[in-house]
Image: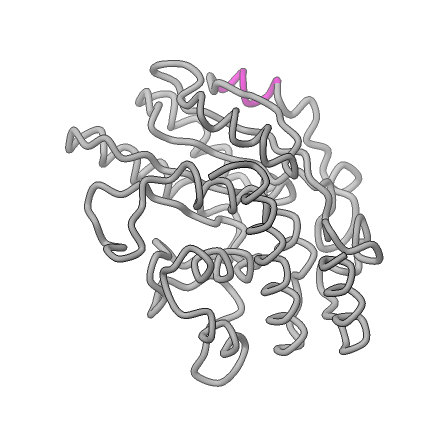
Amino acid sequence: MKNEKLSIRACAIRKHILRMVSSGQSSHVGTALSCADILTVLYFSILNIDPKNPADPDRDRFILSKGHGCTAQYATLAERGFFNPKILETYYQNGGLLGHATCKMVPGMEVSTGSLGHGLGLGVGMAYAAHLDAKKYRVFVVMGDGECNEGSVWEAALAAPQWGLDNLVAIIDYNQLQGCGKTQEILNLEPFKAKWESFRWAVKEVDGHDTDALLKVFQKLPFEIGKPSLVIAHTTKGKGISFMENRVEWHYKSPNFEQQTQALKELSS
């Protein structure tokens, strides 16, 4: 899909996110808006998937490790044709879509996530299974930067190059904010790129909202034969909504009706 169409899709996904979070009066709108462009490029131009056959054994696997941003993945799956967008209206309602990523009754969602730090380990296991079975599918894992405070992330980061998992791609949604403040003030990650490279990952950095740049980076996978790939995607929390961008309170806060109306107006302008 061309860059212009990708941007239109990302805007549609952001509108779904706003409506879901506003209707459900749930949280995590900022982190969902942050990764919308990344998911758009992956689902519409990179992943080998078929919405009509979501269990195809040769499909690429995608894991949203930052499962609290699940509205972004629900909206993307609906836009990609995995299920009727009307189902998004059940978000945070009794019997409807849950507030953390859940694979139960959601076509196209590989695993349930939400307890941070687990996604990369799951991805390593899936990628290693592909190697053992001589399969060609790839495994993509999107993580938050605050999530990298978890020790389990670094255990998985050590394991992946040990087994030469060049079918594994990790993407860091590096928006530099987490639930309680700035990521670097809570637990400094820098020098972030150098740390992953010292763990024998092939690393590239990119503007996480530039769909053209994201597309070019993902088209070069794997970055090095025999090494897992890491994309550090520099993003803005609350991207696309002026009063949410880079504001830590929008990690947990949900928009009221007036704020939703203003946000949708900005996305439509």
Residue nearer the viewer, 104 or 48: 48
Q: Report x, y in % for residue 98.
A: 48, 71
Magenta: main secondary structure: helix
**The magenta stretch spans which residues?**
194-199
Q: Residue at x 47, y 75 (%)?
A: 86
Q: Residue at x 46, y 41 (%)?
A: 42
Q: How many marks?
A: 0
The answer to if 226 sits in the magenta stretch is no
Q: Residue at x 38, y 21 (%)?
A: 161
Q: Is residue 132 left or right of 54 when viewed as pictured?
A: left
Q: Report x, y in % for residue 166.
A: 35, 23
Residue nearer the viewer, 188 or 80: 80
Q: Is residue 187 left or right of 142 when viewed as pictured?
A: right
Q: Quadrant of the C terminus?
A: bottom right
Q: Residue furthest bottom?
A: 94
Give the quarter of the image for residue 143: top right
Q: Is residue 119 left or right of 237 when viewed as pictured?
A: left
Q: Considering only vertical position in the picture, is 255 above or below 62? A: below
Q: Report x, y in % for residue 76.
A: 49, 56
Q: Is residue 175 left or right of 155 when viewed as pictured?
A: right
